[in-house]
Amino acid sequence: MRRDQTDAERKLWAHLRSRQVGGAKFRPQHFIHPFIVDFCCPEHWLVMELDGGQHAMQAEADQRRTAFLAAQGYRVLRFWNHEVLTDIEAVMERIVTVLSSQRPSPQPSPSQGEGEESDMKTATNLFPQVTTFTNLCRAFRDAGRGKQDKPEVQVFAYHLEDRLWEIKHELEAEKYVWGGYRPFWISDPKPRLIKAAPFRDRIVHHALYNVLEPLWERSYIRDTYACLRGRGTLAAVRRYEEFVRWLGGKGYVIYPGGYKRMRRRNVVNARRRVKALEVGYAQGEVTFAHARSSIASWLGLATPAKTFRLSRHLFLEHDVRNIGKRLLVRMICRDSGREAMPCLISSPACM
């Protein structure tokens, strides 16, 4: 995922944003596992890719990417960057033509995660997909993965075909009866009460999930992480690391775990500012109140990053009537719950 758009992407996005094209909502840099597409309109299942000159050398990779997206039900439009930059009207006309053409069915509901309203879409003819024998076989494999040594799985697998046909007929006749949950305790990492469904019911759970999950997943925002293929805990942690590097806050570099460090440029600017305040105050160009507020603002920025040694070193080099040192001592005393030493805070001798 790129942080900055190319010139062609910026120009096309200016014509797509805010539902300018037939009321359709487009999203830039949209995640469709395992790819990130340039633009996507989930409600119309339309993907648009802008190709630069380097794509002429990777035509096969682009074809595989397009084939994968098409297999997922998306319509893919590809434009060269120079087409967007030199003939945006023709590009928009082609987009409008595709949007007005017949859309695939069923349509999943587009994401509500960005605060905009949209119409609910209804997917039909799903139950027959749940009860197909192929789907039930896949559900058995998913439910039994990693549990082949469990007695209930082995008993079910011994008469696998008969058991799956039995489930299929009960579901189709609407006579399926759910079993009771089996409670048990685990102690990893802490004592917890777990209630497990019978293996037979877990097969039906997976059969339902196999049909419904693709419809739901397309409606999620790109930063949804849960029991999704390719978007589990590790992917969430890596995405978090990207966020804290890109959006590190005001003047900080934030590391996983919450540790903050002042950015180098902020430290350099602070040293120059305090030195300029010291010189300006000595020449009568800066007032005491202005110097105090400026130094206090630096300490307010630096405190969350635990920069006591850095601040001490800075104020030993340059300071205005010991303002920085006295504010630093007051901050230490406040954090430790003790009263500040009078000679370091309010005594004229220290000023």
Image: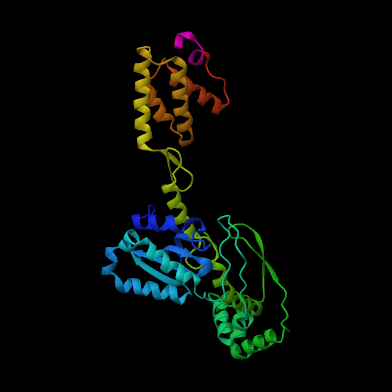
Q: Residue at point 62% right, 78% down? A: 124
Q: Quadrant of the C terminus?
A: top left
Check if residue 204 falls in the magenta segment: no
Counting every numbered tag in the picture gives: 0
Q: Residue at point 40% right, 58% down? A: 12
The one nearer the camera, 336 or 90, is: 90
The one nearer the camera, 173 or 44, is: 44
Rendering quarter of residue 156: bottom right
Residue 211 image position (x, y, % from top left) = 58, 76
Residue 34 visible, this orientation:
no
Relative height, residue 8 to residue 349 (above, below)? below
Specify whether 82 is left or right of 327: left
Please name the predominant secondary structure of the magenta segment in the image: helix
The one nearer the camera, 276 or 196, is: 276
Residue 5 visible, this orientation:
yes
Specify whether 23 is left or right of 35: right
Please give the range of residues in magenta: 343-351
The one nearer the camera, 165 or 281, is: 281
Q: How is the image coloured?
A: rainbow
Q: Quadrant of the N terminus?
A: bottom left
Relative height, residue 282 to residue 337 (above, below)? above
Rendering quarter of residue 65: bottom left
Q: Residue at point 56% right, 72% down? A: 107
Residue 143 image position (x, y, % from top left) = 58, 76
Residue 237 image position (x, y, % from top left) = 47, 55
Relative height, residue 240 to residue 344 (above, below)? below
Q: Residue at point 49% right, 68% down? A: 229
